[in-house]
Amino acid sequence: MSSFFGNLFGNKKRTTTQAEVLLEELIDRERADQEKQFSAESPARCDLCSKSFSAERFFVDGEVKGTPQVGVPDGTSMGQWANMCAGCFQARGVGVVWGSGQLYERTPNGTWLMMAGFPPPKNDA
């Protein structure tokens, strides 16, 4: 991916942030390559800080800590969701797991591929 990001950012040296390093640790590349689940939208900015996603490697579509909770049909509750940059997710995200958040990585063609937070595997029983 490093050569792709060099080309994406005009071959400028790009520093990886600590927040991005933490997100890299969550990646399940094998499952991402198998499932090929892409974001239905292509968000332009972080909903929390308004940072442009044009030069970002990741975004998380997930629940935000400290937001009002609403009940869901399974009897649990969840807060408001947002498209977050890596830094905002590190500071305010609940998690990357089904029901709390999905991690997306930009592909060479500019789409966003889900890399973590997949639904539970389907039982073939």
Image (spheres, grey):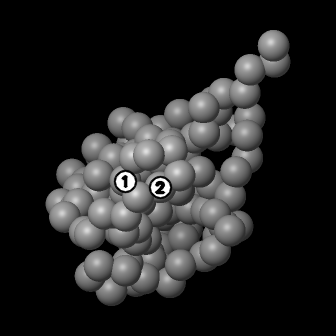
Q: Are marks 1 and 2 in contact (CB under 8 Å)?
A: yes
Tell me residue 115's x, y (percent). Answer: 55, 45
| First in residue order: circle 1 vs circle 2 | 2
The image quadrant of residue 81 is: bottom left
Residue nearer the viewer, 109 or 73: 73
Locate the C terminus and report the quarter of the image it occupies: top right
Tell me residue 75's x, y (percent). Answer: 44, 46
Tell me residue 10's x, y (percent). Answer: 49, 76
Relative horizontal placement of residue 124, taking residue 106 as reference (left or right): right
| Number of residues whose C-alpha sits closer than 10 Å to that of mark 1, classed few (under 14), some (14–19) or many (20 or more) | few
Relative horizontal placement of residue 43, taking residue 32 as reference (left or right): left
Question: Does residue 120 sit above or below 39 in this rendering?
Answer: above
Instruction: Check disc 2 and report the residue beneath it.
Output: 72
Tell me residue 50's x, y (percent). Answer: 33, 86
* Amino acid type shown at disc 1: Ser
Identify the residue shown where x is 29% and y is 52%. Answer: 94
Residue nearer the viewer, 56 or 6: 56
Identify the residue shown where x is 63% and y is 55%. Answer: 113
Residue 13 visible, this orientation: no
Instruction: Check disc 1 and report the residue beneath it.
Output: 77
* Amino acid type shown at disc 2: Val
Relative horizontal placement of residue 109, taking residue 68 as reference (left or right): right
